[in-house]
Amino acid sequence: MAALYEGYTLCGLVPAQNLSNSGIQGIEVERDTDHVVVTDSTRSVTLYKVSDQKPLGSWTVKQEQTLTCPVVYNSQTKEYVAVSDNKVVRIWKEDDILLDKAFRATVSSNVWRVHTVVEGEPIVVFQKGAVRLLDSLLSAPQQNIEEVFSQDEAIRWSTYILAETQQFVICATELKGDHFLYLQRLNPNSLQRYRLEREEPGLSPLSFSASYRDKQICLLYLYPNGHVYQSVVSVRGLGAGDGVQAVPLPRSLVLSLPVGEGMLETASALVLDEAHVAFVGVPHPSAGTGKDFLCIWNTNFQTLQAGKEMAGKIYGQLWSFSSKLFIPHGKTLSVIPYECPKSSLASALGKLKQARAEGKLKETSSVTMVTISENASDKKAMETRKTVCCMTKETEGLLSRADIQDLQTSVGQLTSALVSRSLAEPSFYTPSTLAQLVRTQSLCHSVCPDLVLLALEKKDYFLCQLCLQFFPDIPDAVTCACLRLFLRYLQFLYLKYSQDAFPQMHGLRSPSLVEIMDWVCLLLDAHFTVLVMTPEAKGLLLNLHRFVKSQVRLFSELGKIEGSLQEINQMKGNKDIRQYSIEIIELF
């Protein structure tokens, strides 16, 4: 399961006065992943050491000048590369203090972005789609720059991808409501233009994210309606297109995220690995409106695996370096460490290699065992008992393995199969097995949404309690249903404990009498105003009134003799007291 850990503040922000943007243009890695370069939206760039959360250096252009794209670090020359006022390329080293004295060159066309290349030369992307290596551009700054895009076509996003030994620059553009993808290969040079399928009228992608795996470039893009699509382009046999004719680019729906009321406005998606995507600005399925979250979804399971509420306004910006997410929110740039275990990815894609053949047999037989159908009606009950018995043994063997973290797929499939059969066949129910599976913490409500409903139907208080404890994404409606069942359960336990007065057995998860009273008081206080207005609660309120009145009278009488009782308690009894004696006690 993916996880988001406790974050920390890297630096403060100076957002725009209307809060339209965070005041940050971009974040780039410097010499290593513990050093990042943060470019603001106006004139300054700052070098930070992430682990220390402190700046190591800062540079600023003149007041009448503006940095127009994020500053990058050239790992080959140990220099910083910036572009100011769209056309002025600036290069300096860390020990340079004033940018005015550093190298600068003016080019002939507006620059869109400068992309870093690991152990390679930075790549310059122009606003009209042309691409140049930095050294080649600086050798003749006033060279003619061709226009790749159409006259009214505007670039929206770009990135650089290294596919084994081939270098690619990917650009997303917009032209009169249509969206295009340009795939440019360097050395040998080639250009291919793709047309993205239209979404609903008027909807444009909010963000793009690209990755390379299995000889393919995968493009992920998020729309305001919460739809997340993926398009795949194979790098094998990529032809040398002219960039004019647009090839239709097929897409597949990966996720359909909840958007709440209206559409998403400031949201973005970022691919973390082949199965996990981070989202910011997308509502949490179980949270109310008005709350902004950073979430990690598993695209294979289509489940929410981690979520963290972010204070302040979300600006729809997100970066990731070395298992750390950088997110501006409010007036803070926060660093959130995360984890997406590789073992779960392998199991999700079916590539898990078991060390023992019997382990694999158990994994498959556990799921298959549930789907056995009994043809003979007279043997159905006996076969069901045998199935439950075998299933319990197989599940225990499955969960006793050392590599339990690699079994998320199997646990999810097994639980879904158990729940489906339990709902279809009332005589088939395995509460202990389901409880074991929930305890693995490899499940969530979205993986098996019928599990909590099954527990409610069976009045399985213990399983409901486990689900509420371990599932982070239970919807509010289901939680309310559990609480209504939970209140009847508390009433039962209270009567049992108060009447029978037997102590809580060691090892059981049933609550104590004090905990029951706390829960009852909490629920009563939370819903007291509703109870007062409800006709059905009139009898309850009268009984409570009489009970409280009697308790007040009792405590009042006890208060009158409190002093006398204390005197008796403090008196030392005469040890030489026979079986029959008369004593005179003077209290006053």
Image: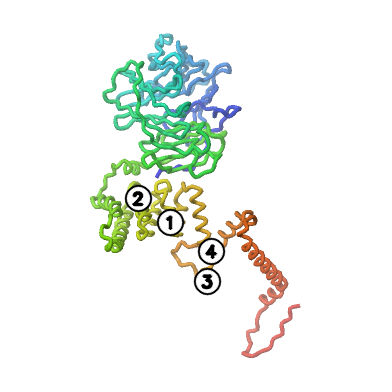
* Residue toward you, 324 or 496: 496
Q: How many marks?
A: 4
Labels 3 and 2: the sequence-earlier one: 2
* Residue toward you, 561 or 459: 459
User: On screen, 507 above or below 9?
Assistant: below
Mark 3 lies on residue: 501
Residue 311 at x, y percent in the picture = 55, 39
Q: Residue at position x 27%, y 63% from top?
A: 378
Q: CA distance from mark 4 to mark 3?
A: 15 Å
* Residue mark closest to the camera, 4 vs 3: 4
Residue 241 at x, y percent in the picture = 31, 17
* Residue mark closest to the camera, 3 vs 1: 1
Mark 3 secondary-structure assignment: loop
- Tag 2: amino acid: Val
Labels 4 and 3: the sequence-earlier one: 4
Mark 1 lies on residue: 455
The local crowd at label 1, few if under 14, some if 14 to 19, many if 20 or more residues have their Cα within 10 Å, is many
Which residue ends up furthest to the right in the rendered image?
588
* Residue mark closest to the camera, 1 vs 2: 1
The tag on residue 491 is 4
Q: Residue at position x 69%, y 72% from top?
A: 558
Labels 1 and 2: the sequence-earlier one: 2
Q: CA distance from mark 1 to mark 2?
A: 18 Å
Which residue ends up furthest to the left in the rendered image?
357
Mark 1 secondary-structure assignment: helix
- Tag 4: amino acid: Gln
Mark 4 secondary-structure assignment: helix
